[in-house]
Image: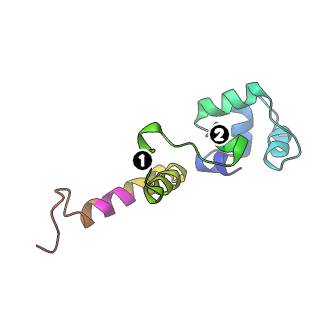
Amino acid sequence: MSERRRLGLGSAKMAAACSVTANVQTDYEHGRRLPKGDYLMKACQLGVDGLFLLTGRRSLPDSCDTGDQAFDRLAVLWVELPEAIRNSVVNLVETIAGQKGGQDPSN
């Protein structure tokens, strides 16, 4: 359910996109059934994090695996944010970093 919501999809829309009924979608989300491979492939094509569906752990892009636990955790959380919030966070960080120039704003 959290992946579907992260993508901004309703239950019926997700079900239709993955070629299952709304009842089957609900069963998947509540753990009453396990999804089949074709469902997982279609869900991943929609942008669902397949690793998260199977393990509960978010995928990290290879470029984000820095070895810095705090940064890597931030990258995992970042993946979960809707795009509008990501844009707001980027604007905030750019402001803190000195109006996009990286200068110390206190100077």
Tag of residue 66: 1
Q: Nearer the viewer, residue 59 or 25?
A: 59
Q: Secondary structure at mark 1?
A: loop
Q: In front: 43, or 34?
A: 34
Looking at the image, which is closer to me, 16 or 69? Answer: 69
- Camera-nearest label, 1 or 2: 1
Q: Quadrant of the C terminus?
A: bottom left
Q: CA distance from mark 1 to mark 2?
A: 19 Å
Q: Work out whether mark 1 precedes mark 2 in sequence or the reverse, and give the earlier one.
A: 2
Residue segment shown in magenta: 88-93
Q: Residue furthest top?
A: 38
Magenta highlight on residue 96: no
Q: Residue furthest left?
A: 107
Please tell me which residue lies in front, 48 or 24. Answer: 48
Percent position of residue 26, x then y? 82, 45
Q: Position of residue 25 (x, y in %)?
A: 80, 40
Q: Amino acid at mark 2?
A: Leu
Q: Is residue 92 magenta?
A: yes
Q: Is residue 92 left or right of residue 1?
A: left
Q: Residue lying farthest front?
A: 67
- Residue kind at label 1, given as amino acid type: Thr
**Residue 86, which numbered label?**
none
